[in-house]
Image: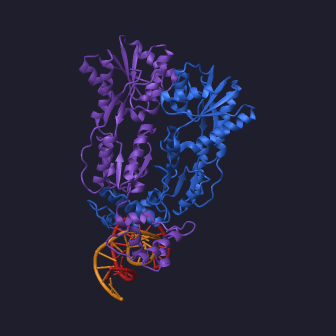
Chain colours: A purple, B blue, C red, D orange
Amino acid sequence: MAEKGPRRVTSADVARASGVSRATVSYVLNNDPRQSIPPETRERVLKAVEELGYSPFSPARTLSKGQSDLILAVLPFEQVDPDLARTLKDLGTRLASHGFTLIWHVGEQSMTGRAHPAFHLTPAAILSYVDENDATAAAFLRQFNVPVIAKMSSEINRQRVGRTQVVHLAQRGVRRIVFAAPERQDVQWLAQGRLEGVRLECEKYGLEPPIVQTIPPDRAAARTSVQDALNRIDGSVGICCYNDEVAFAVLAALTDLNIKVPETVAVIGCDDIPLAQFSQPPLTTIRFDNSRSMMGLVDNILAVISGQTPTPMPADQLSIIARASA
Amino acid sequence: MAEKGPRRVTSADVARASGVSRATVSYVLNNDPRQSIPPETRERVLKAVEELGYSPFSPARTLSKGQSDLILAVLPFEQVDPDLARTLKDLGTRLASHGFTLIWHVGEQSMTGRAHPAFHLTPAAILSYVDENDATAAAFLRQFNVPVIAKMSSEINRQRVGRTQVVHLAQRGVRRIVFAAPERQDVQWLAQGRLEGVRLECEKYGLEPPIVQTIPPDRAAARTSVQDALNRIDGSVGICCYNDEVAFAVLAALTDLNIKVPETVAVIGCDDIPLAQFSQPPLTTIRFDNSRSMMGLVDNILAVISGQTPTPMPADQLSIIARASA
DNA sequence: CTGTTAGCGCGTTCAG
DNA sequence: CTGAACGCGCTAACAG
């Protein structure tokens, strides 16, 4: 019952201005196929809309339809990685072509009652990056009565990254693996999955279990940290980095330690960020080709919105971008 | 009039279950200070809420209040830079402590009618990254009857980046400036402002006008491009990069060309991305300290929502992070 | 076949 | 603490 500044222009205003009923205005604006409005009337309505600068009030629209065309992506990350940003931007474009609007909410764990964006929003669907196994989170989301799609959920996929890294390294003659873990807390669950993949693949190849070393996001500290790890082993070493960002820190540390890459120590990252090609030496890394899974995701979102059950999503295709660091 | 799956739990359900009226339910849930509800009744209502898993339907809420507590950030960027992402995340946290929810919409120019997120949303305010001088955009947004805050708007601020870069370089003895421009289209207006600052400061210092060179985001191409620029000049050269990402490309090019940094060519970036310290050599760059302007921004958003006029925002503090590249 | 009336959806709030 | 009205767009049912 608030009134802010100049009163909103409503469909009633348009109806009055064009001498028709509100229903007619609605029919014209929504191009209702079940109604045939004479072009002349239609013109009059559209003209009034234009002149008055009318635009329908979305809450009212959502209220009466019981559905909005919003898709809410809930991102519980401390930082939004460029790769994720690109992916979501792309997803948004695709959804837009189906008449949906993708919006992002970036926040802590945002699980607490009224802090959760869905409390303020009512999307047609929620795209959740929460671990699929998190039952509490799932239960919490249920209250909003909105279908939820979990992305990035599979433990298997996380492991595949680590496995792929090890395979590449092993093929290059590496016999001893270090896993360079991130310090960021929000991403530990992801790192754990990748590490597990590294472990399993080491086992499979008959390599010793990986040394796990957390790499601080600071050049001097990274140097010490890498040094520590290398002190504990010898032989031909390969470092599997949680992601490219960690890999940059590792590469800098190795440079500072005067260790030759890839001759003495090989390094492989993950994500293929745009900057990866510019490191010294250029970073060998893993790229997700999510074009396929993206299509699947769009289909799943649309399906879920219309009440169907989602089909399992195809796994992201992983490919190795072999540059000079491994 | 749609009904999806199990009907929503409404406040009427809660009222029925707890034997009170819908009004009372509302009073209890909103802790209305003008009403005194007996603790016992309050308990009963809250219990029913809990048991039924009720959560208010936000469109209805917004409809009746005429205001949502959503703040919409419209981001017309091809990519969301990590720095911007961090800033917005921070802004979101601050707004949350005032009871508002920040959401992002990332899309092309998104100016076309129904494609614009505000068409589907009705935020309490829009945070726009569109150039303040863009009258068409401003007119378009007006139709939504929602206050708009423009961020990142000042040409002066854009110029200050370029100026600061040149000052640092000149102090280090550089006599000839190259401006390394980005290829990304969405960001040209920003780059132009920074370049203009570089120009003006060169003039002020009595240096020759800067050479402008666009740096492609590809290692080999960047090398050629940097080579081109350097062929056209001699003397002690400094390269002002549009941002750190471009700077990484430039640094890689110089490495590939076997040119010493900073002895032969000095390089300075902008943004101080987390990776900046890990380049070879570590990147000298410019950091925005937006903590002050952030406070101002929060205040302005709150002011604008309650119908006041925004106060001019304090300029971002710029500081030079001097590392080894310049 | 065109256009109108009436009433829904749900939370909030005023008068009582 | 309650009944009733309100905000605004949508649409079934109905009238001209």
Residue at the spot x=37%, y=67% of the render? A64
Which quadrant of the figure has residue B283? top right
> Percent position (x, y) of residue A19?
47, 80
Judge left or right: residue B198 versus residue A184: right
> Percent position (x, y) of residue B141?
53, 59
Q: Is residue B151 visible?
A: yes
> Percent position (x, y) of residue A261?
43, 16
Residue nearest the viewer, comparing A299 with B4 = A299
Q: Is residue A91 above or below residue A174?
A: below
Residue nearest the viewer, comparing A259 with A280 = A280
Q: Is residue A110 visible?
A: no
Judge left or right: residue B314 versus residue B79: right
Residue nearest the viewer, comparing B134 with A222 = B134
> Percent position (x, y) of residue A268?
38, 24
Label total for image: 0
Residue nearest the viewer, comparing B119 with B217 = B217
Judge left or right: residue B190 versus residue B61: right
Q: Is residue A19 above or below residue A269?
A: below
- Quarter of the image with the C terminus of chain A in it: top left
Residue at the spot x=24%, y=44% of the render? A312
Q: Is residue A256 above or below residue A291?
A: above
